[in-house]
Every structure is written in structure tokens, then in C-alpha cells.
């Protein structure tokens, strides 16, 4: 009797554990790629678990350059300011498809691979975006020529070309290996900001059906044809105003692991309140969508270029994040100054106006950096 009672309790436990909609994570939950490697599956489950612990801070191109420096081994603007590295690292694949040795922001792909290995060795999380050129016109990602998506789908005149581009992405992903020869898991974020009109895959430049098909084609080509099994897939929009708008081009739960959006604050302090309001509106919606679809919510890109408000991190950004569960928030790149009026940086650097406040933000219990995640063993 006792034995039996214990057994049915155990069955009930397994059952409840499998039901989880929030909080607890089922041990058998799998990412979109059912053949994902052990480390990739572990990352997926750990990202879900970590949702209840805080927001991982991420930074694009963090190890490659910062304001006033380039390619100094081990350097990072985040480390210069806090003494610690980010928990998440973003890198960008644009121009890999056309065999350039450097990406569209001049980062050499071979260096990028070694930064990715460093980040992984430290237990950090890596996400890759891809501002791929327009395969129909040969221009940049920002060339919204009509018919581009249709042209690269199966049966389209540029499908073969597009497949050669995916071959290069696959080769890149399969060249990312850890010390034991295991593939390094990557959160791949293709076709980002897909509700905006500025990229050829975005907004009115293709139909929802075309984008969904492109997303699915891309994923199944990498996964099933090229045997790439170290990817989690991120779906992301720009600013959005309704759940309906958010899911309009969603390819389906079987194809997506992470859902997010990108948001930038206009370049003046008067916009702080707007940033807080819009972020919270969108995060509330994202939170419900993530719960309903059992996906990992993230702020896939954010920034306030120039960070002129010395208290922006604690008084605006933390408020904007509200009470929502967010896996990570990725600040965009610290490209630096072209001249006094032309600059691009979204994270502080040593001596920058918001640097002291960023240290407070770093100390806040809600934010997670390298030292907070390394012990979590996200890949086990
Ligand atoms: C944009 C800017 C550009 C950059 C592009 C791709 O938002 O940062 O300078 O080339 O992203 O990384």
C-alpha cells in the first residue's frame, strides 16, 4: 500500500512537472530542433529555468571592440566598467554569405569564432544575427526590393543561390566547437525586426505566408540537410502594438525557441517615459505570448544611443523591464565616435556619463552577468 501510494505520488509529480506553464521546467522539454545536441538542449532548458532568476545582460560585439579600442585580447567595455563580462554575447554574420573575410561591421569572421569560443568557455550565451544581403539585387539587407522573398523560396529564381548562402552559415556554425569537440550552442536570430519595412524580408515587402515559409525553409535546410543541431531559433519583431501584429508572421511553435523584440530609445532624455511605457506594453504582451506558446521571452536588441542620461540604467531601463520575466536583454554595439556628433554606443565605457549608474545596475539583484551565470552551468 505504502509502496503504491508513493508510486502514484511519483506519477503525479511527473505529470505535473510536464504540465508547467510557468516557473518549473519539464525535464523532457525539447527545443524546436528535436535532434538538438545535448548542450543545446541543456541551454534551452536552463534558459527557461533562469527566467525566474533575472535578466541576463548581453552586448553586441562586446569582445571585438568598444569605444576607442579594437581587438585587445580579453577587453570588453562592460568589463572595463564593472569588472565583469556580460552573460550574453551577440555577433553578426552579415557578408559571410558573399565570402567576405569580415562582416558588415568589419569584424573578421575568424576572430569572431575565437570570441565565441572564449564566451562559451566562460559559460556565457551566444546569439548570432544575420543582416544578409538582398539575394535578388545583390544590394544590402536594407534594399527592400519587391519579390525578394518569393525569389529565394523553393521554385524561385534565387533559391539555389540562397542555398549556397545557407551552406556557408552551416559551415560557420559547425566550425564552432568547445574543448571536448562538442558544438557550441547558438541562439540564431535570422530575419529580425520582421514587422518593419526596412529589410527585404520585413513588413510589407513580403506576405506573412512567404516569411513563414522562408523561416521554415531556412531552418529545415540547416537542420535536416546540413545537420546543424547546435541552434536555438529566435523570432523577433521591432516595436509592435498588438499581439496580432506580433504573431502575424510567426512560423509556428515547432520552429521557434526564443521570442523577442527590438526597441531603441530616441536620442533625448525627454523620451525616457516613452521608452518605459512602450517597453512595458510590449513586455506584457510578450510575456503572455511566451506563456501561451511555452517560449523563452527576450529583449533581442535594445539601446539608447549616446547614453546622455547619467541615471538611465536604474531610472529608465530597469523601470522599463518592470516585473516581467525576460531571459536576456542585448544592448547593441559600441561602435564608437566618428566625430563629436556622430557616434554609436549603447553600453557605457570607462568614464562615460552613465558608467557609475551602470555599476548600480550591475549590482541590482535582477541583472545577471558573467559571474552570476558561470556557476549555473548552462550547457549541462
Ligand atoms: C545597425 C547599426 C549599423 C550596423 C548594423 C549591423 O543597427 O549598428 O551600424 O552596421 O546594425 O550590425
Image (tube, rainbow, N blue to C red):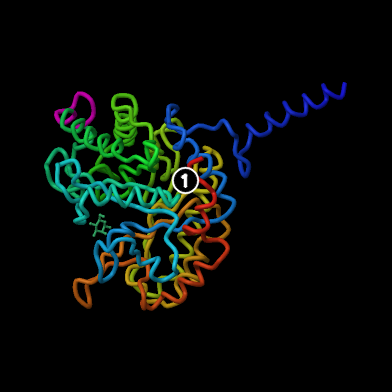
The question of residue 277 being in magenta is answered with no
- Where residue 9 sits, quadrant-wise, is top right
Q: Which residues are magenta?
A: 151-159
- Expressed as whole percent of the image width and height from the top left, the position of residue 150 reads 22, 32
Q: Residue at x 33, y 36 (%)?
A: 208
Vertically, is 305 above or below 376? below
Dot 1 beta carbon under 8 Å from ligand 1:
no
User: 89 or 156: which is nearer to us?
Assistant: 89
Classified by dominant secondary structure, the portion drawn in magenta counts as loop
Left or right: 149 with respect to 357? left
According to the picture, the residue beneath numbered tag 1 turns out to be 243
Q: Residue at x 56, y 61 (%)?
A: 366
The question of residue 158 being in magenta is answered with yes
Vertically, is 42 above or below 337? above
- Expressed as whole percent of the image width and height from the top left, the position of residue 285 reads 51, 49
- Expressed as whole percent of the image width and height from the top left, the position of residue 264 reads 36, 62
Amino acid at each position: 500500500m505504502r509502496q503504491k501510494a508513493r508510486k502514484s505520488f511519483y506519477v503525479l509529480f511527473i505529470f505535473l512537472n510536464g504540465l508547467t506553464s510557468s516557473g518549473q521546467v519539464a525535464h523532457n522539454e525539447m527545443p524546436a530542433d528535436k535532434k538538438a545536441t545535448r548542450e543545446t538542449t541543456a541551454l534551452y532548458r536552463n534558459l527557461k529555468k533562469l527566467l525566474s532568476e533575472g535578466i541576463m545582460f548581453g552586448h553586441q560585439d562586446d569582445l571585438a571592440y568598444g569605444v576607442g579600442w579594437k581587438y585587445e585580447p580579453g577587453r570588453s567595455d562592460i568589463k572595463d566598467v564593472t569588472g565583469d563580462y556580460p552573460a550574453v554575447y551577440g555577433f553578426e554574420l552579415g557578408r559571410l554569405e558573399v565570402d567576405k573575410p569580415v562582416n558588415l561591421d568589419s569584424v573578421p569572421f575568424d576572430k569572431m569564432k575565437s570570441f565565441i569560443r572564449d564566451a562559451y568557455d566562460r559559460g556565457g550565451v551566444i546569439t548570432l544575427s544575420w543582416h544578409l544581403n538582398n539575394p535578388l539585387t545583390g544590394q544590402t539587407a536594407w534594399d527592400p526590393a519587391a519579390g525578394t522573398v518569393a525569389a529565394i523560396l523553393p521554385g524561385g529564381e534565387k533559391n539555389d543561390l540562397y542555398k549556397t548562402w545557407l551552406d556557408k552559415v552551416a559551415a560557420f556554425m559547425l566550425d564552432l566547437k568547445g574543448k571536448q569537440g562538442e558544438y557550441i550552442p547558438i541562439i540564431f536570430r535570422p530575419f529580425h525586426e520582421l514587422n518593419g519595412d526596412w529589410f527585404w524580408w520585413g513588413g510589407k515587402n513580403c506576405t506573412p505566408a512567404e516569411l513563414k515559409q522562408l523561416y521554415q525553409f531556412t531552418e529545415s535546410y540547416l537542420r535536416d540537410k546540413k545537420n546543424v543541431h547546435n541552434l536555438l531559433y529566435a523570432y523577433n519583431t521591432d516595436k509592435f502594438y498588438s499581439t496580432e501584429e506580433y504573431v502575424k508572421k510567426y512560423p509556428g511553435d515547432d520552429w521557434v525557441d526564443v521570442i523577442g523584440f527590438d526597441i531603441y530609445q530616441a536620442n533625448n532624455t525627454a523620451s525616457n517615459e516613452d521608452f518605459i511605457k512602450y517597453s512595458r506594453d510590449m513586455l506584457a504582451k510578450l510575456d503572455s505570448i511566451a506563456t501561451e506558446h511555452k517560449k523563452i521571452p527576450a529583449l533581442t536588441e535594445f539601446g539608447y544611443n549616446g547614453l546622455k542620461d547619467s541615471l538611465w540604467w536604474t531610472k529608465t531601463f530597469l523601470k522599463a523591464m518592470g516585473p516581467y520575466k525576460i531571459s536576456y536583454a542585448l544592448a547593441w554595439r559600441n561602435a564608437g565616435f566618428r566625430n563629436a556628433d556622430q557616434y554609436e554606443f549603447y553600453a557605457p565605457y570607462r568614464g562615460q556619463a552613465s558608467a557609475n549608474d551602470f555599476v548600480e545596475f550591475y549590482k541590482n539583484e535582477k541583472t545577471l552577468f558573467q559571474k552570476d551565470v558561470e556557476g549555473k552551468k548552462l550547457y549541462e
